[in-house]
Image (spheres, grey):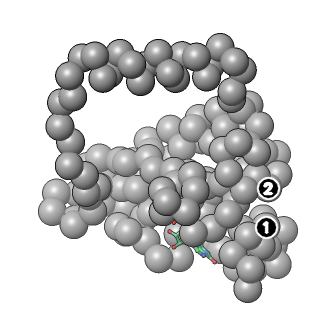
Amino acid sequence: MDPYSIFADIIAGRAPASRVYEDDDVLAFMDIRPLTPGHLLVVPKVPARNLAELDPEIGGKLFKVGQRLAAALRASEVACDGVNFFLADGVTAGQEVFHVHLHVIPRTPGDGFGLRARPRTPPRADLDYLAGSVRGALERGTR
Ligand code: 5GP
């Protein structure tokens, strides 16, 4: 099945999902391959393949619903001492399903979930240069 259509099929009720929350704009359901038990996905009902296609109002709603779900996870029977939000935008970022989705991942000590990276502190001049470049893009109206 075309991965783009999986979430559309879930939203339309053509594919099964363990639903948790729904309103006019978003749907939340259990991830079929949870990174930790209780892992949820929040998706916009109007399909957007990536952040550039997503209406920012709906993007705000994804976060708002994610925030409620984080509280609900902590108050539920799901083991949850902490929560990570994760959103992959683009193949290089790890996106596999091309319908924007916010991962809401409950965390417990030693659950094995983590991000791999090699952080280092660059010279201030490098930070300032890139900050200026991003500011320029904002001023040119990139959203
Ligand atoms: P991505 O890597 O694109 O950020 O994450 C895609 C997520 O969608 C994965 O965590 C994967 O387990 C989940 N997923 C893929 N297909 C289905 C499906 O048919 N149903 C559900 N509930 N989750 C899915």
Residue at which label 2 appears: 47
Q: Residue at x 73, y 85 (%)?
A: 1
Ligand 1 is found in the corner quadrant, namely bottom right
| Residue 111, above or below 76 | below
| Residue 27, above or below 133 | below
Indicate the secondary structure of the residue bearing disc 2: loop
| Residue 139, above or below 10 | above
Q: 22 or 34, which is in the foreground?
A: 34
Circle 2 Cα neighbour tier, 10 Å, few/some/many (<14 / 14–19 / ≥20): some
Q: Report if the CB atoms under discs 1 and 2 are less than 8 Å apart.
A: yes
Q: Tell me residue 110's x, y (percent).
A: 15, 62
Q: Which amino acid type is shown beneath numbered disc 1?
A: Ala
Q: Tell me residue 82's x, y (percent).
A: 29, 47
Which residue extends farthest bottom? Answer: 1
Indicate the secondary structure of the residue bearing disc 1: helix
Q: Tell me residue 62's x, y (percent).
A: 63, 42
Whether ligand 1 has any atom under 8 Å from the Cβ at mark 2 is answered as no
Q: Residue at x 57, y 38 (%)?
A: 63
Residue at which label 1 appears: 8
| Residue 26, above or below 77 | above
- Residue 94 in view here: yes
Name the N-terminal-most of marks 1 and 2: 1
Q: Residue at x 37, y 48 (%)?
A: 84
Quote the CA–CA distance across marks 1 and 2.
7 Å
Toward which corner of the image does residue 116 lie, by quadrant?
bottom left
Left or right position of 17 against 114: right
Q: Which amino acid type is shown beneath numbered disc 2?
A: Pro
- Residue 30 in view here: no
Q: Tell me residue 135's x, y (percent).
A: 54, 16
